Image (cartoon, rainbow, N blue to C red):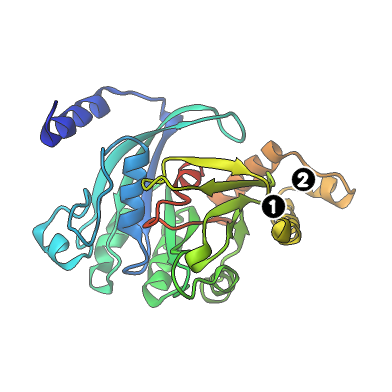
Amino acid sequence: MPTPQQKASLAQVVTKNREVAQEKIRNIGVIAHIDAGKTTTTERILFYTGRTYKLGSVDEGTTVTDWMEQERERGITIVSAAITAFWTFPQASSVDAGEYRINIIDTPGHVDFTAEVERSLRVLDGGITVLDAEETVQSQTETVWRQADKYKVPRIIFINKMDKLGANFPGTLSAIRDRLGAKPVVMAIPIGAESSFKGIVFVLERKALIWGEDETGSAFSEAEIPADMKEEVENYRAQTIEAIAETDEGILEKYVSGQEPDIIELKKALRRATIKGELFPTFCGSSLRNKGVQPLLDA
């Protein structure tokens, strides 16, 4: 059996030898306020992409990206760390199916290391803004958001810690609009909150994903939308389609005439609006509890 060190060396060799087309490379930064869950989210991404063989923990000092002794002692990110992973998009929808190379940069969240974040933002294709579902938009969130605006970095939003006491999905959406002046486009809503959080519903697809007893979160299943959520899903779905239609004349014409654009068309338009910085696709989950990260990777 290979040792952990041998496995890590093998992973590095495999990474170097795997080539993908330029259009299938993503340089992504994970940005947020301190303790929102950036590093934990990054660790889950590395695990689900097969880049690591076990889940790293900030509390235990076993994360890949927090490699400095001072970072592991304090449980915070001090310097940005970059690592490469590969993710296979399972089906053709708004993008081509196949393997994508994701170069991930985990940035500091503490205000003292703001310059380190700004340096990273200059090279990014896009960012994942991680928010704490209970704390919502915090002071450093506003700082890194303004920095991302400055460098015109497209972003998707991940409302994390849906399992936390006081988690408030609608309240977080309101804070994004009010404090960041941004337009979140809800792509997934939580099933339950706090201790009852167990999955998400994709609003466009009207499809639920439920995470079960698997401790790593690798296994999940599709399910029917809970009966008591169907009206909520339809409300969010209508808002999402309307927001996308406002950015695309062709979709707007269909929308006004009462036709519903297909999902592929909607996602292509959403991607264009996201790259322009007009819309911000929004997902949710709990990185610590290993729920919701795979859909984030697809996004």
Name the amino acid type tagged 2. Ile
Circle 2: is it few (<14), some (14-19), or many (20+) Cα within 10 Å? many
**Viewer-nearest residue: 93 or 205:** 205
74 vs 144, left or right, is left
Name the amino acid type tagged 1. Ile
Q: Do the residues labelled 1 and 2 touch (CB within 8 Å)?
A: yes
Q: Name the residue under label 2.
A: 251
Residue 129 placement (x, y as % from top left): 43, 59
User: Which of disc 2 and disc 1 is earlier in sequence?
Assistant: 1
User: Residue 244, labelled with which disc?
Assistant: 1
User: Residue 185, labelled with which disc?
Assistant: none
Circle 1: is it few (<14), some (14-19), or many (20+) Cα within 10 Å? many
Residue 53 placement (x, y as % from top left): 26, 38
In the rendered image, the residue lying farthest to the right is 257
Residue plotted at (61% across, 36% down): 94
Total label count?
2
176 vs 241, left or right, is left
36 vs 224, left or right, is left
User: Compared with residue 49, is residue 153 higher up or lower down, i.e. above or below?
Assistant: below
Q: Can residue 121 be seen in this view?
A: no
Residue plotted at (57% across, 29% down): 91
In the rendered image, the residue lying farthest to the front is 213
Residue 13 placement (x, y as % from top left): 20, 26
